[in-house]
Image: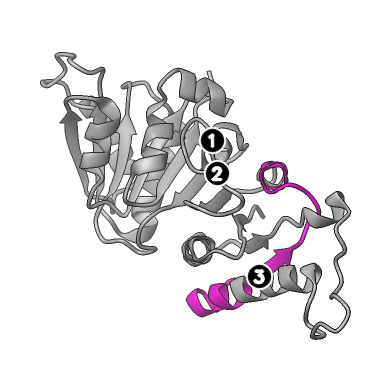
Amino acid sequence: MSAVVVGVDDSEDSLRAVEWAAGEAGRRRQPLQILHAFIWPLLGVPLGRAPGAPPEGGLRHAAERILATALARAHAVAPDVEVTTSLPEGEPVTALLHRSRQAGLLVVGSRGLGEVGGLLLGSVGARLGAEAACPVVVVRGPVTPPGPVVVGIADRGESEAVLTFAFAHAARTTNALILAHVGDEGSASGSRSPLPERDLARWQERFPTVTIDQETLTGQPDKALMHAASQASLLVVGSHHRHELSALMHGSVSQAVLHHATCPVAIIQIHP
């Protein structure tokens, strides 16, 4: 069974990500894996406590405390979920990308995990969103925000994977779903709906409990989508880029909302 994997460090943002991931693992009825990448052994840094320091001192004990704190937070949110912890030696992004190959979902906080702020310098969440082998959720804002699930659709034939993820999450959380058509800035698409009636009926039959609304956005795509999702519980977007630099160079909407949205953001890779 695939698991929900969440990366943690010593930041409160990563603990909020643990809470979100634990809740999602419970809704999916999947196990949760909490991962903290331990890079210090690779740098030759002493891991034990310094002379005269308390018994619980040292970098390894600090890493173990991070995992213990995250484990307790996960159990508090979802006591029935099977939770394991992992302390791989390596750089955080590399460890998480490796784990994404077997995961059903990868979750991180919006800051932390060694992230350096700014679009040009990149971030953990941005690189994972561009390169992970499974869907990625970057937890921004409240862990359990009210409101609908919003999915950005750039093309009517976008991707089954993006819509499946959004509909399934809306069904699990009993939230309404807004299909937001994201056209090019200045395009005359105001009269179009994101999905034709035939396709809409197919999705409604597949997910009969989900209330569906459609909205055509105007203006700059990333700003319009973030405005549409200002009261959302989750924003779902697709990404055509396999590398963060490519996404930034081509003005990726998914990367823009990842850095500025006010709710959790799910990024689903779209393969040609």
Relative to 159, does residue 99 appear above or below in the rendering? below
* Among numbered discs 1 and 2, the one appearing first in the sequence: 2
Residue furthest to the left: 191
Is residue 81 highlighted in magenta? yes
Indicate which disc residue 116 carries.
2
Q: Position of residue 59 (x, y in %)?
A: 78, 68
Give the quarter of the image for residue 236: top left
As drawn, the label of residue 66 is 3
At 39% from the left and 58% from the top, the residue drawn is 172
In-front residue for pair 234/90: 90
Label 1 – label 2 distance at C-alpha: 7 Å
**Left or right side of 48 for 255:** left
Which of these two is toward me, 253 or 29?
253
Residue 145 vertical placement versus 252 (above, below): below
- The CA span between labels 3 and 2 is 20 Å
Residue at image location 50% in from the left, 30% down from the top: 120
- State the mark number for residue 122: 1
Kind of residue at badge 3: Ile
State the CA–CA distance, disc 3 to disc 1.
24 Å
